[in-house]
Amino acid sequence: MRRWFSLVLDHPWAVIGVVVLITVVTGSFIPKITFNASIDAMIPADDPVLVELAEVVEDFGTQDLFLIALQSEDVFSPAVLKKLNDLALELEALPGVAAVQSPFNAQRVDSSFFGIEIAPMTSGLPQSPEAIQDFKETILDSPYAGRLITADGRGAALFLELENFISNRNQLMEQIEEIVGRYQGPERIHMVGDAYILYFTEQAMKEDLVKLVPFVVVIIGIVLYATLRSALGIVIPLVTVGTSVIWTVGLMIWRGIPVSIISMVMPVILVTIGIASSIHILNKYQEGLAAGLSKRKALEETFAAITSPVAMAALTTAAGFASLITAFVHPIREFGVLTAIGVMLAMALSLSLVPALLILVREPKVRLAEDKPKKDGLLTRILHTFVAWATHRPKLVVAGVALVLVLSALGAGRITLESNIVNYFGDSSPVKQATMVIEEVFGGSMQISVVVDTGEEDGIKDPAVLQELVVIQEYLDSWNAINHATSIADVIRELNQALWDGDPEFYAIPDSKEAVAQQLLLFSMQGGSGIDSLVTYDYSRALVTAQMKTLDAEEMGQVMGAVESFLQERYGSGSNLSVYLSGTPKVMMRLMNRYVQTQVSSLISSTIGVGIIVGLLMKSVSLGLLSLIPLVFTVVINFGIMGFAGLPLDAVTSMISSVAIGIGVDYAIHYISRYRWEAAAGQGNAAALRITGTSAGRAILFNALALITGFLVLVFSHFRAIGVFGLLISAAMIVSSLAALLVIPLLLNYNAKRQERGKGMKKTVLLVLALVLTLSVAAGADSRTGQEILDELTFQTILSGSGSAEITMITENAKGAQRSYSLQVYVQMTDEGDAQFLEYLAPADVRGTKFLSINPKDGENQMWLYMPALGRERRIASHMTGDSFMGTDFTYEEIGGNFDYEDDYNVQRLGDQVEQGVDCYLLELTAKASDAPYDKVRMWVWQEKMVPVKIEFYAGENLTKTLTLSDFQLVSGELIPHHVVMANNVQGTRTILELQDVSQEDVSPDVFTVRNLRR
């Protein structure tokens, strides 16, 4: 190392130039910094609990609640109802918000004289006293009472469903926050949801970094000046640690690692602990100058004496942080490795940049040793007292330490666990306050789910299985902490009651599987929605969901444990159902259990790692073990403080032990290294201890003071957990520095009197460190205009005129799961109107179900459904135009080919293209009036046959649906597509129609009668 320091002192500008170059390169990555505070990011992706949750999300959609609650003296007042409605409409219009469920649009199933109707809670905004009273009675008599609006009329809620893939989630949260802010007052509006809490957390993280890093730099600068009394003592340490922080953060960003709620403290930690080596270097350098040495000679002697302890301190501190690589929580592992790298970079800069800077600047003024007053100062006398206690009153010191350890051990047994990120915030935080209000008023801010898997298609339609869903709901609702349990069984019971004229006695599960299937078919035909979040597309699995309150770790463990025990006892061995618990609360429980594992594993690995490193570098096993003894005190006392103060073990505090060991061992290393230096220089044991206690002790106290004040800056974080971390680490620094000044001299004195030998150990070294292509095709064109092409267009489907066909209808959800139905379809088109008669041929549970629709041009549409399981037909109230055709992605107009393109749209011919392997005209139709079905339509017309093969439908500039037509066959001289696909580009669903046995012969009018339904 002497050659290295000679090189640095001879070529300081070269060293500075290399450092500046690396700093510029790594600093260029900082603008690309990203943040991620998601709880899912804390668990390995292959963890069974997270895999289960991912499967639930895949099958049923998001399991996160996003709730906006409004508090008012009377939510049923006209002004408040209007505000709530306007807020819901404005939120729903935001790109990225898939849907907003409000008290106004919540789905209800009604029974009336005319039959059954599935409709919103209210058709318009109630403002008159009569309309408001009717709305109030309706919603408070519905399943939404207490969930969307409270019985006392003092609270109302909106449930937001976000799209699965949002390009800029933070931007959406900002927009929602801005909109909600505009509606505040005099009513209070609160937001709770995983997406918003994640956004709020990331914003708080950014604010903390901007605030805390400069703050800690100022605080450390003040402490440095107070201790070293020179500008040099401020600038050099801060430049060194600042450079190491830039390098480390740049490396993190380059590797694509986002800032987490854990790693956000890394810059503060690096600034705080990185100055330690600079303090020891400057302290020793000033001693050399005070002894009368020249600047270069003082630097050479400084680094000859200080390099070993600086390297050991850095290695052991890095080992403490690197031990976190054994942690279960992924961000903790990232934090540990990155901070370890940062510590090593700070050491490298201390042994390169610091001497390069010191050789270039003027040496500080110091008082020569012979000029110093003979009388010791207060600090020197205190340090001498520590040495005297350790050497002359060892039994008293041991007794005092033992008493503190016993008390701390008692407190350690009272430590609790915490994994809910909401509790990381203080009680004054908007997120914490909103959570408390929503849980008090609406019963819970988290969603808990129970998955019921039958293992077979349509298994959920079994009445016995549906009854089990009811049993699970009732059990969940029996807990005070769980509310509003719901499942597909609720939908079935509502439908059954409505089909029997609203008789409460029929709020029950039907007796047969066929009755259930036919009621669900009716639900989908009537435009019912929302069941995809309750049952899989093939009806093999169902979900029971409920809202759960935020609980402390012990209460949550009791509730979750009891629920899982209930499910295991009822559906364990012998049951043909596979039933298990899922949801965010279960993920939290998993984290809480793993925090203990992280604490234990990192404590063991850091202790072993630090002991080995110290033993190797000092070539003494006994000295390696000796350096660890004060750390045992530090860890135990830290746990005692947590227990007595009621501070939980969470993602942040679970790192305390390994961090305290990694940092705290520095004091022992510097003390032992200075003692050995003095002993090697010929000093006796007493003199060596006295000199070490004064010199190294002074640096230790200065260093501890800097660390304590630096870590206390974390108290000003937005996060309560980060503030607690700062307090605990500061306390650990106090304990470990006092232990080094009291316990280490006691043990060194004991060791010197007993033996002077040590055992060497073999050194062990461990080393731990897409293309998108697009194609486009163009085709030639002829001279016809768009209007001319549209005039010649022939667009016929099976429902475009009278006739019949057998249809295989396949509906496909966004995940690709399909349902298949076979139907016989009869159609009649006359000048007076049209009619359709459909009979289901398959599957077996809906076979014989018949549907009749009579649509006179000048009269009211009539729809009837015959369900064999009921043995009777039911009238269905509906407004057909624009409604979904039988629950598919088609509207009645689309499937019938009845759009009036010529009257409703202006047409423009665009460049011709090839579509489905044929030359096509491309037409763009723009709506003439606002009441047109779509704002814009694009149509690809087969040039040879003059039939459309593809049509795109737009709302504004957004593509909403795509219709493709193929397998054209001549039927009565007309080209009819026999394979038709309608894709819903917004929802990601598709409907496929395959036609067989198509006929356009007239159908008897007797087919289109109510009497025919019963045949």
Image (tube, grey):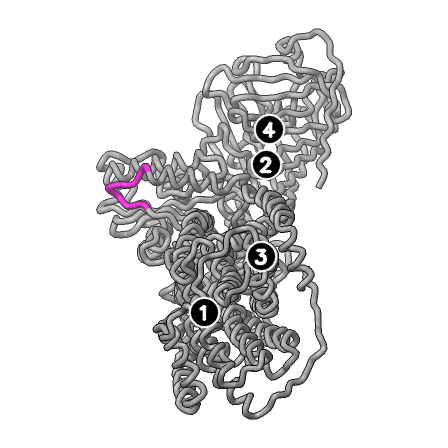
Distance of label 1 from label 3 (alpha carbons): 23 Å
Where is residue 464 drawn, in percent x and y?
A: 53, 62
Residue 185, magenta (yes or no): yes
Q: Give the residue at the far top of this rendering.
A: 783
**Upstream in the sequence, badge 4 or badge 1?**
1
Q: Which residue is mark 2?
A: 838
**Upstream in the sequence, badge 4 or badge 3?**
3
Q: Quadrant of residue 893?
A: top right
Residue 355 — which label? 3
Q: In which quadrant is the N terminus drawn?
A: bottom right
Q: Secondary structure at mark 1?
A: helix
**Upstream in the sequence, badge 2 or badge 1?**
1
Distance of label 2 from label 3 (alpha carbons): 90 Å
Dot in front, 2 or 4: 4
Where is residue 610 drawn, in percent x and y?
A: 59, 73
**Upstream in the sequence, badge 2 or badge 4?**
2
Q: Secondary structure at mark 3?
A: helix
